[in-house]
Image: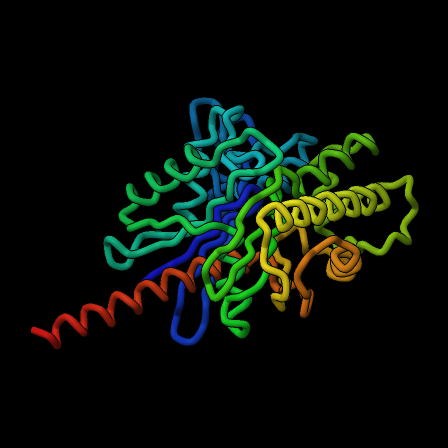
Amino acid sequence: MARGIDIGTMNIVSAKQEGSDTLFVQQRNSFVEIDYSDMAEQMLARSDVLHIRKGDQVYVVGDDALNFANIFNQETRRPMKQGILSSEEQSAIPMIKLIIEQVLGEPEPAGERVYYSTPADPIDSELSTLYHQKTLESFLSDMGYDPEPINEGMAVIYSELADSNFTGLGISFGAGMTNVCLSYYAVPVMTFSVARGGDWVDGQTATATGETVDKVTSIKEDDFRLDFTTDAGGVEGALSIYYDNLLDYVISKISEEVNEEDVEEGLDVPVVVTGGTASPTGFEGLFEERFEQADIPFNISSVSKVDDPLYSVGRGALVAARSEEGQQAESDASAEAED
């Protein structure tokens, strides 16, 4: 057995194979703090709301955190910021451990291989991903897994570009970062991230409109359409403006990096876009329009958005883990035959 897990700023998603199906388990990577009372804790337990108690406080964790935040007019707190563990959140470590344990479960058997997503170092920020990567490795090892990091952009390639022999450009628009990988026959040619994603869009929109970030996030996730027909004075109009700006920014960075890396001309490259931030209707069309205007030296054969962007990175991590597992089984069988 082997598993994959996407540890993202907004969502944590695990993937494992069950027969011919892939089973995904997801939780929002956030929490909210409420005052403790016996009655409150009993109600939370009866309702199967994921929570933990610390002293006189109760922390509601995961998908229910956003609902509680909106009810109590609070902001959710995040274990991660800009794609990595937050140095500003004192409760980051215990909260993300709880969510990972809830999503991944126990290894079957002990020492089960798990590939976990990790972002590339951003090209537009001094942030380093090393501490984040090694801390998650320690969490997973303590749970009894045998962990291996996989670049988030490369996970997109594994998930979505098997039909093109894992050759293409994979772009994951996450909450904290946007990760990019150009692969040629499953060999990464270029990997990087930019320190903007869905959180940047939500934060800019909240500042412009005077709404809370969580309120903006709820509106964005509730059937928001990226079509520029909405009144520009409202939240949806502001979301459209900042989405447009995010796409221009990301594509300009891709163009800069491709030219700096001196990627060979003449390649015929499919482009696949995924990530929770890519979910709104209209995203694919707007991205394709902007991308076709970019200064890219190779030929773009197609531009597509996956049908289930929330699960793409987790699926890719699982594909990588199962591929390694299969190679190891072949190696062991070959060694036994030689004996």
Does the rendering let one see residue 227? Answer: yes
* Rendered position, 264 above or below 19: above
Q: Position of residue 315 (x, y in %)?
A: 48, 61
From the viewer's perspective, tell me whether residue 104 is left or right of residue 193: left
Q: Is the N terminus in the top left, top right, bottom left or bottom right quadrant?
A: bottom left
From the viewer's perspective, tell me whether residue 232 is left or right of residue 196: right
Q: Is the C terminus in the top left, top right, bottom left or bottom right quadrant?
A: bottom left
From the viewer's perspective, tell me whether residue 7 is left or right of residue 125: left
Observer-nearest residue: 136 or 17?
A: 136
Does the rendering let one see residue 281? Answer: no
Observer-nearest residue: 3 or 45?
A: 3
* Rendered position, 34 above or below 254: above
Q: Position of residue 89 (x, y in %)?
A: 52, 26
Observer-nearest residue: 73 or 127?
A: 127
Q: Position of residue 74 (x, y in %)?
A: 66, 30
Q: Position of residue 255 (x, y in %)?
A: 68, 49
Residue visible at 53% across and 31% down in the picture:
127
Residue visible at 54% across and 72% down in the picture:
164
* Rendered position, 32 above or below 67: above
Residue visible at 62% across and 35% down in the picture:
124
Observer-nearest residue: 297 or 26?
A: 297
From the viewer's perspective, tell me whether residue 324 is left or right of residue 24: left
